[in-house]
Amino acid sequence: MTERPSRWPATWPRSAWTGRSVVLIGDSIDDVDAAHAVGGRAVRYGDGFTDRSRLDASGHPVAGTLVEAVTLATALAGVSMVESPN
């Protein structure tokens, strides 16, 4: 099992989500880095912490609304709805 990056909260499960099954929705460049650190993917939310122009320059998907972010995340995951690991 891959260890969590040290910046992850201790309450996050160690094995419920793994690598490519993870699509994180975040509003900062660090969020995407965290997802990639475990082999996951990410959608950036453009109306949050980081300036939208910086997110757009990253080359990763950027959503303008949370609904759009969930739509992009489910498409990346290849599912038609959000699934629980349990």
Image: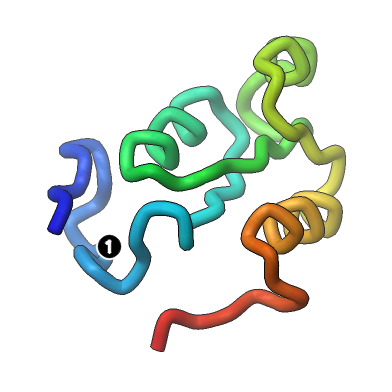
The picture places residue 35, in percent across and down from the top left corner, at: 43, 41
The picture places residue 52, in percent across and down from the top left corner, at: 77, 20
| SS category of the residue bearing label 1 | loop
Residue visible at 24% across and 37% down in the picture: 7
Which amino acid type is marked by label 1? Trp
Q: Which quadrant is the N terminus positioned in?
A: bottom left
The answer to whether residue 7 is above or below residue 69 is above
The picture places residue 12, in percent across and down from the top left corner, at: 27, 62
The residue that disc 1 covers is 12
Q: Which quadrant is the C terminus positioned in?
A: bottom left
Structural crowding at the residue carrying mark 1, measured as other residues with C-alpha within 10 Å and reported as few (<14), some (14–19) or many (≥20): few
Residue visible at 78% across and 12% down in the picture: 53
Q: Is residue 39 left or right of residue 8?
A: right
Residue visible at 34% across and 61% down in the picture: 18
Q: Along the line of sight, which residue is nearer the eye, 11 or 77? A: 77
The picture places residue 56, in percent across and down from the top left corner, at: 77, 18
Residue visible at 26% across and 46% down in the picture: 8
Q: Is residue 79 left or right of residue 35?
A: right
The answer to whether residue 51 is above or below residue 15 is above
